Amino acid sequence: MSRTQIYPVITNLPTITTTQMIEVDRRMMDDIGISLFQMMENAGLQLASLARDAFLGGNVRGKRIAVLAGTGGNAGGAIVAARRLTSWGATCDIGFGHDVAALADVPKAQFDILDKITSIDLIKPQDLNADYDLILDGLIGYSLKGDPRGGVADFINAANAISTPVLSLDVPSGYDGETGAHRNPTMQADATLTIALPKFGMLDATENIGRLFCADISCPPCVYENLGLTKVYEAPFAQSPIVELSRAH
């Protein structure tokens, strides 16, 4: 990953727990009218942009990317990123931690769009190798409960065993957004693009998270009111839809 400073650095963002983030998502959809589909589109575009700018030298043409996806919102964002990167000239293979039939409705709709515009190879954990230029981790989002299991755990272990850099969406798969704990196994990310706000403990930890970025998914400041955040939300995306977050260490 390039160490070049390509995005503004923000020093004073609050962190958010899983419980608070669930309420943010609810307010976005029910109170504001921004749909889950829109949020996935925004998250996927920012993930693809960070992948291009920070890992792929500013040009994705000819690059090979392994996109790892679970079943929920994080999977949808990763699938959107795959569509964007494919449209920009990359080759993206997708590894699902569960059967494709287990995809929730909105991520399934995103996958159907991708399937209509390009031929996607589905890969298994044993197919991950150092020939990939990048791994995008969208296996598990902020709502993890317990240790990763089954195909999800297999993909995490396979990614951790090779030298290909990893960019995680929202949290590294296996990171507990409620407690800040690293479950067994946890993805060893070179960078993490967290969504809306960093999850609890992320600013105090570097293990498995790597460089920490935050992306705007069009969440207005009013949705954070009365959530008990530890710091005031101060419009971090005034200069860029992606910012890098300074760390405690």
Image (spheres, rainbow, N blue to C red):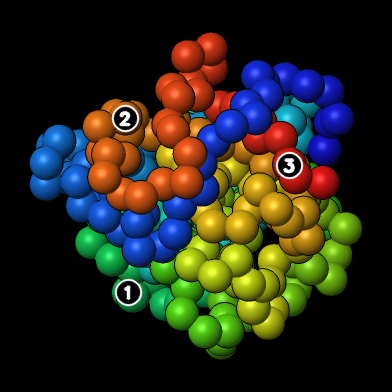
Task: Give the number of the mark in front: 1 or 3.
Answer: 3
How far apart marks 2 and 1 lie (CA) works out to 36 Å
Task: Say if 129 sits above or below 112 in the image.
Answer: below
Q: Earlier in the sequence, mark 3 or mark 2?
A: 2
Residue 3: % across, % down: 86, 30
How far apart marks 3 and 2 lie (CA) works out to 23 Å
- Give the residue type that dot 1 points to: Ala
In the picture of the structure, the residue carrying the numbered disc 3 is: 247
Residue at x 48%, y 39% (from the top left corner):
231
Q: Nearer the viewer, residue 30 or 116?
A: 30
Name the mark on residue 153. Answer: none
How far apart marks 1 and 3 lie (CA) works out to 39 Å
Residue at x 63%, y 53% (from the top left corner):
202
Residue 199: % across, % down: 52, 53
Residue at x 20%, y 37% (from the top left corner):
34
Residue 167: % across, % down: 67, 48
Local secondary structure at mark 1: helix
Q: Nearer the viewer, residue 50 or 11?
A: 11
- Give the residue type that dot 2 points to: Pro
Local secondary structure at mark 2: helix
Considering the image in quadrants, where does the N terminus appear?
A: top right
Check disc 2: other Cα within 10 Å, few if <14, some if 14-19, many if 20+.
Answer: few
In the picture of the structure, the residue carrying the numbered disc 1 is: 101
Residue 203: % across, % down: 66, 48
Q: Earlier in the sequence, mark 1 or mark 3?
A: 1
Check disc 1: other Cα within 10 Å, few if <14, some if 14-19, many if 20+.
Answer: few
In the picture of the structure, the residue carrying the numbered disc 2 is: 221
Residue at x 35%, y 63% (from the top left corner):
19
Local secondary structure at mark 3: loop
Q: Is residue 97 left or right of residue 204?
A: left
- Give the residue type that dot 3 points to: Arg
